[in-house]
Amino acid sequence: MILAIDSSSLVASVALVDENTVIAEYTMNLKKTHSQTLLPMINEIFKMTGIDKKSLSAIAVTQGPGSFTGLRIGAATAKGLALALDLPIVGVSTIEMMAYNFNHCNKLICPIMDARRNQVYTGIYECEKDELKQVVEDVALSIEELIEKIGSIGKEVIFIGDGIPVFQEVIDQTLKIPHYYANQHLNRQQSSSLGVLGLKKLAEGKAVKSDYFAPVYMRMSQAERERLENGKENEN
């Protein structure tokens, strides 16, 4: 059994998953601070199910990309629980987790997370024998660059994620390939998908000790960019 924790975006989601069942899942998509909601959600799941935390084999958590603050909160929560329970951590790409919502899809699967500054966190996947295969590695790039990549591949594509309302108009105007958008019950992060992927990666030996887990931010935070820009100005 694995506890899955995601706070990489506005969505906060936790789940208990074993090899056969999604035992419980608690998801909120509201503008509330994850530091206030995540632990109460986890406690509620264990309270309602009556499952002992000592029954867990590992903790799965989204390692990024995503919100800098959200990823830090998720990582800190996972590391604290893993340390207290002496459990390993399985880090899972946020993009891969989102794509896994469509693991039987016959189209390209393209999660797009709004990364601000006219960019998206994205990657492109397709299904091969019911397994996800990565076509374009996770990356932060402009929506125009992404549309160009999809056009060069030339296959129908379905988009997932909070980048849809931000970039749908430009996608519809620019992308000539047939394209679709996930319905609301599948177009955001789901900790149940994270839990299933976490179990697969645990079986593949991809878990790490809590001390060694760290988020993957993919680009500098706004504070780091401003510090770098201020340093350049001071040099001039």
Image: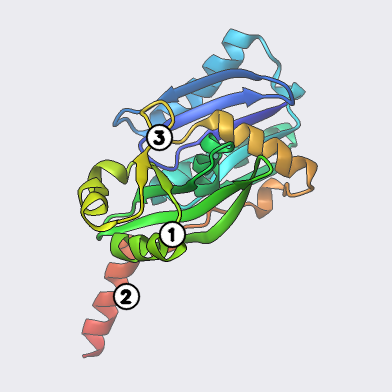
Mark 3: give few (<14), some (14-19) or many (20+) Cα within 10 Å: many
Q: Mark 1 highlights which residue?
A: 154
Mark 1 or 3, closer to the camera: 1
Amino acid type shown at disc 2 = Leu
Precedes in sequence: disc 1 or disc 2: 1
Name the residue nearer the viewer: 39 or 18: 18
Q: Secondary structure at mark 2?
A: helix
The correct choice, above or below, for 198 with respect to 63 in the image is above
The residue positioned farthest toward the bottom in the image shown: 236
Q: Estimate the x, y position of residue 45 in percent, counting from the top left.
A: 56, 16
The Cα–Cα distance between marks 1 and 2, rounded to whole angstroms, is 39 Å
Name the residue nearer the viewer: 120 or 91: 120
Disc number for residue 42: none
Asked whether residue 82 appears in the rendered view, the answer is no
Disc number for residue 228: 2
Labels 3 & 2 near each other (Cβ < 8 A) = no
Q: Mark 3 highlights which residue?
A: 187
Q: Estimate the x, y position of residue 79 in percent, counting from the top left.
A: 61, 42
Residue 35 appears in which quarter of the rendering?
top left
Asked whether residue 118 appears in the rendered view, the answer is yes
Q: Secondary structure at mark 3?
A: loop
